[in-house]
């Protein structure tokens, strides 16, 4: 099992929900407002007067065989609007209850 952390511009919310549904990833934890900036390019998302954009984040668990398709769909979404920003990170889940 893998944990997939997705950080994205709030404008992507509905698309991300559709991608999770499409991949039968029902369970997730959602943070509506998170701040940050990309490590390579893009505008900061601080929710301030100077940088008004905001990000959201989702943590979902996926079976190993679901991860590649999920990442591919997220990458396609990011490529459609690269200025908005979207990142996904995959981590191993050692144990869970």
Image (spheres, helix red, strand yellow):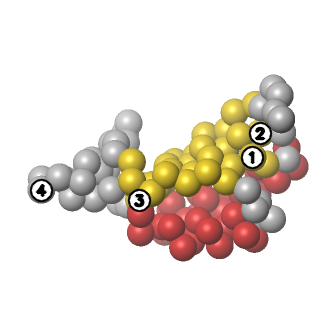
Query: Is residue 16 shown left or right of residue 2?
Result: left
Q: Position of residue 82 (x, y in %)?
A: 41, 60
Q: Are marks 1 and 2 in contact (CB under 8 Å)?
A: yes
Q: Which residue is mark 4?
A: 49
Q: Are marks 4 and 3 in contact (CB under 8 Å)?
A: no
Query: Is residue 48 shown left or right of residue 3?
Result: left
Residue closer to the observer: 42 or 2: 2
For residue 41, above or below residue 47? above
Q: CA distance from mark 1 to mark 4?
A: 35 Å
Residue depth check, mark 3 versus mark 1: number of the one nearer the observer: 1
Q: Decide which of tag 1 and tag 2 comes sooner along the chain.
A: 2
- Location of the N terminus by quadrant is top right
What label does residue 14 carry, if any? none
Q: Which residue is mark 1?
A: 61
* Residue ID at (76%, 31%): 92
Q: Position of residue 86 (x, y in %)?
A: 48, 54
Query: Is residue 54 shown left or right of residue 3?
Result: left
Q: Which residue is mark 2?
A: 2
């Amino acid at each position: 099992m893998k944990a997939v952390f997705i950080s994205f511009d709030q404008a992507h919310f509905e698309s991300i929900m559709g991608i999770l549904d499409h991949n039968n990833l029902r369970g997730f934890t959602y943070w509506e407002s998170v701040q940050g900036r990309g490590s390579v390019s893009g505008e900061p998302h601080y929710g301030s007067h100077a940088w008004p954009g905001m990000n959201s984040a989702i943590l979902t668990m996926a079976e190993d065989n679901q991860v590649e398709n999920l990442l591919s769909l997220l990458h396609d979404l990011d490529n459609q609007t690269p200025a908005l920003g979207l990142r996904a990170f995959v981590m191993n889940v050692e144990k869970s209850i």
